[in-house]
Image (cartoon, rainbow, N blue to C red):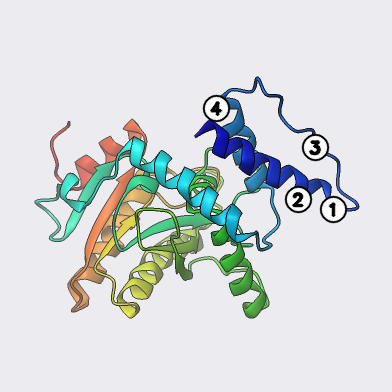
Amino acid sequence: MKSKLERLVTYLIDERNAQQNGPRFEKPTQHATQGELWKLFRALVNTREPIHASQEFYELQDDVLHELIAADGIATCADATPSPLVPHAFLWRGDITRLEVDAIVNAANSQMLGCWVPGHYCIDNAIHTFAGVQLRIECARIMQEQGHEEPTGTAKITSAYNLPAKHVIHTVGPIANGNPSDAHREQLASCYRSCLDVAAENHLHSLAFCCISTGVFGFPQQEAAEIALRTVRDWLATHDAEMTVVFNVFGHADELIYRNLLHLPEA
């Protein structure tokens, strides 16, 4: 693993240093630890322009990401807890990048190119990091063809590349900053409907939602969860689609909220 990371980091630094106007990067010393190399690799791919890499880079990157994901363990819908209240709705707490479903939902920004902050622990950064640099390239192509930023409340589908999921559905949630308006509430509901619509249009049967807009976008967690559950429940009731929906939470507070709403006992 360490030697693979060294080769990946060297490739990325050489690529960056070849840019005429960019700052020069120093290569890590031979004493750099595997953890330090991973941190540097993540920072470099987080800030990498959506340009194609060599086939050797892709193969090496894919090997590393598959190994890291497998080491953490892959979860499926069978590991999630079914709700007695909402048929076909489940709750699972964990890292969404380790979930093997037809599609996971990414809380994207309007540029839809992933998070560019090195090592940031938002879901957008994690999904792009573990999917691989191919995901940003595909998103850039979609955005170039579209010709404008992604509107709030809509959704786009891509491959998931190195993730256990088959696809990623990207949606831009409303920026509520702790004080959502009625327009924000409708936009958030639209995110959930749009993702479900895209999943159904692509004949997918399992979809995992993150807690859209509740991070840096500042939508209050309790209200966001209520909107999410109500919207998903209404969509499932009005569509003839064989769809399993997993509400994915990462933190304890969100887990408690969803357990209460889904009528699940505390773990």
| Residue depicted at x 63% and y 79% | 145
Q: Which residue carries the number 3 mark? A: 25
Q: Secondary structure at mark 3?
A: loop
Q: Are marks 1 and 2 in contact (CB under 8 Å)?
A: yes
Horizontal side of 235 relative to 23 (left or right) equals: left
Image position, residue 87 (x, y; %) = 12, 60
Amino acid identity at mark 1: Gln
Which quarter of the picture shows residue 120? top right
- Real-space Cα distance between discs 3 and 2? 10 Å
Amino acid identity at mark 3: Phe
Q: Which residue carries the number 1 mark? A: 19
Quick one: label 1 or label 3, which is nearer the N terminus?
A: 1
Amino acid identity at mark 2: Glu
- Real-space Cα distance between discs 4 and 3? 19 Å
Amino acid identity at mark 4: Gln
Image position, residue 1 (x, y; %) = 49, 34
Quick one: label 1 or label 4, which is nearer the N terminus?
A: 1
Q: Are marks 1 and 3 in contact (CB under 8 Å)?
A: no
Which quarter of the picture shows residue 148? bottom right
Q: Which residue carries the number 2 mark? A: 15
Quick one: label 2 or label 4, which is nearer the N terminus?
A: 2
Residue 120 visible (yes or no): no
Q: Are marks 4 and 3 in contact (CB under 8 Å)?
A: no
Quick one: label 4 or label 3, which is nearer the N terminus?
A: 3
| Residue depicted at x 71% and y 29% | 28
Residue 112 visible (yes or no): yes
- Real-space Cα distance between discs 1 and 4? 27 Å
Q: Which residue carries the number 4 mark? A: 34
Image position, residue 57 (x, y; %) = 60, 53
